[in-house]
């Protein structure tokens, strides 16, 4: 089974988690895109969706799924999104696609976070995947120096602007022993919008695509 087939399998499995008559949150990336394609087949089961990026909003609309403004919604029953790395504790690194800030906002409003990922994403220790940090453009150099003090090597994601008009620093070389603490420390640096550690609001359920089928993992 290829990596993409595993992503398709978890996307199909995630459809079983979708409650009837609700508004759900939808993430960004290739696995989330597979989920949206499956969601299109059952679109009448849901009232609509809140998107974590412009790309996701466009794909949802192309399937005829109503895209709602998060400010018009008090709570989302479910959020489905991928990850770049995830541990058995359900802590994640996200933001490979650059949508981390909106993803974190939608996740914060969701009662249940289902992470959909292929088996290459499950790790014992976060940090091999460079940690994305969204930064206000004028603070780029200052934030880079502060991130270097934490032991990382930040690199500007060339030619990329987020949906919020900001830049991304990808921080290489971190061994993240305490993701909850580091998430807070990085978010305290002035000029940081958010970082791609999802440890304070971890996933509730991981649907992991493997060559032997889809595994369900909880913390
Ligand atoms: C986007 C993300 C994605 O969930 C993450 O990059 C995984 O992407 P993919 O499903 O394409 O492997 O955080 O900002």
Image (cartoon, helix red, strand yellow):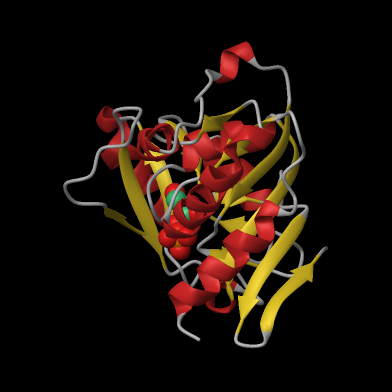
Q: In this picture, is 20 found above or below 196?
A: above
Residue 161 at what x, y percent from top left?
25, 38
Q: Residue at x 40, y 30 (%)?
A: 191
Q: Is residue 218 left or right of residue 145?
A: right
Horizontal side of residue 45 vs 28, given as left or right:
right
- Depth check: 152 or 183 in front? 183
Residue 212 locus on image (x, y percent): 67, 87
The residue shown at (34%, 32%) is: 163
Assign the C terminus to one quadrant of the image: bottom right
Tell me which corner region of the image, top left, top right, bottom left or bottom right, holds residue 209.
Answer: bottom right
Task: Find the residue positioned furthest to the right.
Answer: 219
Residue 8 rendering spot, x and y as whole percentages: 52, 67
Report whether 32 appears left or right of 111: left
Vertical order, 164 against 173 (above or below)? above
Q: Is residue 153 above or below residue 57?
A: below
Relative to 21, say whether 133 is above or below: below
Picture coordinates of residue 137, whole percent (x, y): 27, 31
Res 182 seen here: yes
Identify the image quadrant of residue 205: bottom right
Front-most of 42 and 202? 42
User: In the displayed image of the protein, which residue is found farthest to the left?
Assistant: 159
């Amino acid at each position: 089974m290829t990596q993409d087939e595993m992503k398709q399998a978890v996307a199909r499995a995630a459809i079983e988690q979708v409650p009837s008559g609700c508004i759900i949150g939808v993430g960004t990336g290739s696995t989330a895109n597979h989920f949206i394609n499956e969601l299109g087949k059952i679109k009448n089961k849901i009232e609509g969706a809140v998107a974590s990026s412009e790309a996701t909003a466009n794909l949802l609309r192309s399937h005829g799924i109503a895209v709602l403004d998060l400010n018009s919604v008090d709570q989302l029953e479910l959020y489905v999104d991928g990850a770049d790395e995830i541990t058995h504790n359900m802590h994640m690194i996200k933001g490979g696609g650059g949508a981390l800030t909106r993803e974190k906002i939608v996740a914060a409003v969701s009662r249940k976070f289902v992470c959909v990922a292929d088996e290459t994403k499950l790790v014992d220790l976060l940090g091999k995947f460079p940690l994305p940090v969204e930064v206000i453009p004028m603070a780029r150099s200052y934030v880079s120096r502060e991130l270097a003090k934490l032991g990382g090597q930040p690199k500007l994601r060339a030619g990329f602007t987020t949906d919020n008009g900001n830049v991304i620093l990808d921080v290489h070389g971190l061994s993240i022993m305490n993701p909850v603490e580091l998430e807070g420390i990085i978010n305290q640096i002035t000029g940081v919008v958010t970082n791609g550690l999802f440890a304070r609001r971890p996933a509730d359920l991981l649907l992991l695509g493997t060559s032997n089928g889809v595994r369900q993992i909880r913390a």
